[in-house]
Amino acid sequence: MNQQAFLEVKSLQFSKSGHTLLEDISFAIQTGELIGIIGPNGAGKSTLLKCMIEFYKKDAGHIRLNGKDTDSFNHNQRAQQMAYLSQYPESAFPFSVEETILLGANAALEAGKLSKLEAQTKAKQLANNLGIENLWSRKLTELSGGETQLVHFARILLQETPLVLLDEPTASLDIGHETQLMNLLRARCNQGTTTLVALHNLNTAAAFCDRLVLLDKGKLIAVNTPDEVITEQRICQLYDQPILVTPHPISGTITVLPKRIHN
């Protein structure tokens, strides 16, 4: 790519307790791309995202956002530049849905970029878009796992950061809410938001993502479009199971299906 990348990960290394979890990871992303991070269990998907938000301190390499090293950001700068949703967001405190979503506006409120009224209006609109407006006054500790995930997703969207990082946001959602969430991400990316999302569902990754980052055992295997990354030979080898990879007869996107073994 000739133009400066919006996000650049270069020679990223990370070890924990003497074990190398990420080894020489490099890729670049342009503004507005929806990038899927895929790979088997233990591939390093969550670790990569945690290094990007400085939850884990990398051993070597750099991560640059618009040419600036992200480890130079203070807490408030990071909150204005990137939003992160963990795989299992905590619900230990009995905040209401309203209070939880509005947490996403804290950085903008502190910077004077948003009024309290504007924040509340946007929060209510996001709740309506996600179909959780009926939960507005409920406590987070009273909700199901899927409902909690949607509330935290609304919180992340309210931050309105140029970069969004999501760790398996659809894991606890039914297919309807999964489709809704991914379409919202796709729409945000079309408007200029750049998104990295770790996904286990390869069909979802193929249907919605512009490109995929494929990891295995902490190593970068491929970065390319879904049809170039998700090949039958590669997927069968990585997941060590018989798997069918074929274009969908209607949409044309890559479809991944398990093969039943007849004994």
Image (cartoon, rainbow, N blue to C red):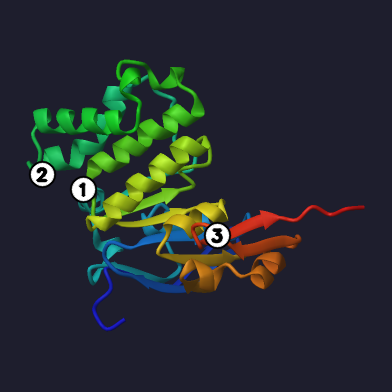
Q: Give the camera-side residue of 221 and 170.
A: 170
Residue 148, numbered circle? none
Instruction: Tell me which residue sits at (35%, 25%) in the image.
Output: 132
The quadrant holding residue 56 is: bottom left
| Vertical arrangement, residue 237 with respect to residue 115, above or below | below
Instruction: Kindly indicate whether the residue at mark 2 contacts the one at mark 1 (C-beta within 8 angstroms).
Output: yes
Residue at which label 3 appears: 44
- Secondary element under disc 3, as helix, strand or loop, is loop
The quadrant holding residue 239 is: bottom right
- Secondary element under disc 1, as helix, strand or loop, is helix
Q: Earlier in the sequence, mark 3 or mark 1?
A: 3
Instruction: Tell me which residue sits at (31%, 41%) in the image.
Output: 156
Along the horizontal axis of the image, is 120 left or right of 29? left
How far apart marks 1 and 2 lie (CA) works out to 9 Å
Residue at which label 1 appears: 76
- For the residue carrying disc 3, how many other residues have a C-alpha within 10 Å: few (<14), some (14-19), or many (20+)? many
- Secondary element under disc 2, as helix, strand or loop, is loop
Looking at the rendered structure, the kind of residue marked 2 is Ala
Residue at which label 2 appears: 111
How far apart marks 3 and 1 lie (CA) works out to 27 Å
Instruction: Kindly indicate whether the residue at mark 3 contacts the one at mark 2 (C-beta within 8 angstroms).
Output: no
Closer mark to the observer between disc 3 and disc 1: 3
Looking at the rendered structure, the kind of residue marked 1 is Asn
Quick one: quadrant of the N terminus? Answer: bottom left
- For the residue carrying disc 1, how many other residues have a C-alpha within 10 Å: few (<14), some (14-19), or many (20+)? few
* Residue positioned most to the right: 263
